[in-house]
Amino acid sequence: MIMEKPVPKHRLVDSPLTVAALYHFALLDNLDQKRRGLLDICDKNEILGTFLLAEEGINGTVAGGSEAINLVVDYICSWTEVEKIDVKFSESSSRNFRRMKVKIKNEIVTIGTDNVDPLNESGEYIEPHDWNEFISQDGVMLIDTRNNYEISMGKFKDAVNPNTDSFSDFPSWADNLSNSEDKPKKIAMYCTGGIRCEKATAYMKQIGFEKVYHLKGGILKYLEEIPETASMWEGECFVFDDRVSLTHGLNEGEYILCYGCQQPVSAYDCLSPLYEEGVSCLQCYGKLSESQTTNSRERQKQIQLAYDRGEKHMGRKLSLKNRSKKLP
């Protein structure tokens, strides 16, 4: 049964926002200058979201007006190290980010081991329109490089789940696969937008796998280009913003985030008497402390009051890092 997604009223916008998800591996220099430039153009054009910069490249997702988003993409493409970048565009019916951040990191996606070089050693791209046929071949092991909480929401048919809670857990799982008696001769890998599987293919080649492939543009590009009637995707795709999930055509899915435990909650589960907006859901009801519950109810009250006055209420930032943690 398809149900309407319960979007909090204070996050609704008059017209859809344009969302741009992008990454690019390149040897970047002058990172602090690039950081200041990104913050300046985003602040001036009311763009919210996150960019990560490192010597190995750029990774991020931002949202704003369509013309504003084009400006920031053009700015990134003006860097001599980039020139051209693949961007996955989608829309959001509500404010899906709460602030703008640009951070300088050691890696734009952390794999947890040294000397992984996706710039010079990564797998071969498989275009979305060739993906179904490729993964249906005999002898191909299909591997999902995302985390457990993402995979629980949706995956490709017959994909192997490495059972990781963080991408930095992946090398250990890959090492075990490399040393197993059933070591596959051909591997196909995928993730949300392509960055994790691209870096994972570099690691797989580093430890001895030769025939390694990955889905170009990730799940998002596949859902954008492949009609549901021809799709091998099952479920919804988790995304790292307040839309929570996307479906075919990059339409928003039915999930929201529980404020109490930061886990995805379906529209159906929101009908439960144990679900309380901004406070708790079926997964965390009765497991939160009394002070947590009281503070969350007060916060929700202030959000509603701010909404009634026509004001914004930013509130506490939800940490994506904690979404995979189990409750006590």
Image (cartoon, rainbow, N blue to C red):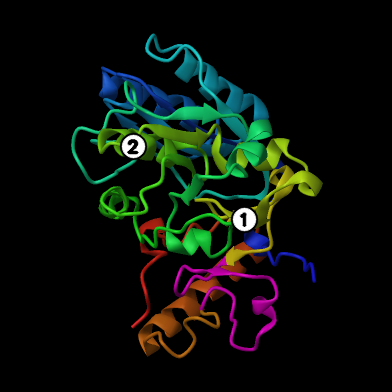
Image-based side of 282 in relation to 322, left or right: right
* Type of the residue with mark 2: Phe
Q: Nearer the viewer, residue 106 or 119?
A: 119
Which residue is at 69% across, 44% downward? Answer: 250
What kind of secondary structure does the magenta stretch mostly adopt?
Answer: loop
Dot 1 crowding, Cα within 10 Å, few <14, some 14–19, many 20+: some
Instruction: Name the foreground residue: 218 vs 261.
Output: 218
Q: Are marks 1 and 2 in contact (CB under 8 Å)?
A: no
Q: Nearer the viewer, residue 297 or 235?
A: 235
Task: Give the residue displayed 63% in from the left and 64% down from the top.
Answer: 255
Q: Residue flagged by tag 1: what amino acid is it?
A: Lys
Residue that appears at 42% across and 64% down: 323
Point out the tag, 1 or 2, that comes first from the N-terminus: 1
- Where residue 76 appears, as percent x and y from the top left, is 46, 19
Locate residue 227, reporting x and y percent: 78, 42
Q: CA distance from mark 1 to mark 2?
A: 23 Å
Q: Quadrant of residue 56?
A: top left
Residue 196 appears in the picture as rendered: yes
Q: Regarding mark 2 in the picture, which secondary structure is present there?
A: loop
Residues shaded magenta: 257-279
- Disc 2: CA contacts within 10 A as few (<14), some (14-19) or many (>=20): some
The kind of secondary structure element at disc 1 is loop
- In the rendered picture of this protein, how many numbered marks are placed on residues? 2
| Residue 260 part of the magenta segment | yes
The residue wearing badge 2 is: 209
User: Is 281 covered by the magenta stretch?
Assistant: no
Left or right of residue 26: residue 139: right
Q: Does residue 64 lie above or below 263 as drawn?
A: above
Tag of residue 157: 1
